[in-house]
Image: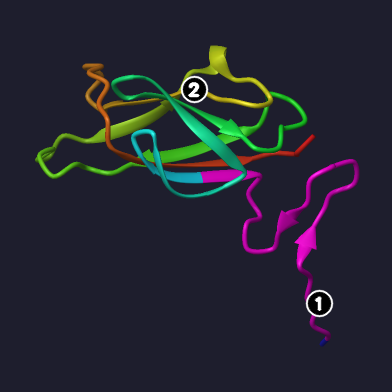
Amino acid sequence: MSTLKVTNIQATGETASRAVSGVAAAWVNANSDTVNESFNIASITDNGTGDFSPTFTNAMSNSNYVHLGTCKHGATDNNDMRVLTVQDRNVTTTVCRIRRTFANGAGNENDGIFVLGIQGDLA
């Protein structure tokens, strides 16, 4: 059996390459608008409590990419579950808008830790 070792992977037609350790098109671990770790995330705009817009360093090829995300309980959250939702009407090739809310449907956006992964083709 042979071993293939590469530094970057680039799909046909993509202008930006992806490091082997970061196969996702973009991902971020953040606490509100403060980025802890990320790949292909230029910045996060704080639109208000629990309302954030990550901006990609390299644009996606279209706005039909996949969003995968979750959020962490805060120190005072007790047993209240939090969810991360993507606002589809605000998705573009360079930015998506997400909200961090209670899982019980009560709304109540709140700040705190979240992780978001983006799967799709880069432009």
Residue in the picture at 55% in, 15% down: 90
Mark 2 and mark 1: span between their CA atoms? 37 Å
In this rendering, is residue 55 above or below 91?
A: below
- Residue located beneath label 2 in the image: 97
Q: Residues within 10 Å of mark 2 (few under 14, many from 20)?
A: many
Residue 62 image offset from top left, x and y in percent: 74, 26
Q: Does the magenta stretch include residue 11?
A: yes
Q: How crowded is mark 1: few (under 14 residues within 10 Å), some or many (20 or more)?
A: few
Q: Name the mark on residue 4.
A: 1
- Give the SS element for disc 2: loop
Give amino acid for label 1: Leu
Image-based side of 114 in relation to 15, left or right: left
Q: Position of residue 72 (x, y in %)?
A: 28, 44
Give the magenta-colored segment's residue range. Answer: 2-27
- Between label 2 and label 1, give the one nearer the viewer: 2
**69 or 97, which is in the foreground?**
97
The residue at the point 63 percent across, 63 percent down is 21
Residue 9 left/right relative to 64: right
Q: What residue type is labelled 2?
A: Arg
Tell me what residue is drawn at x 62 percent, y 34 percent. 56
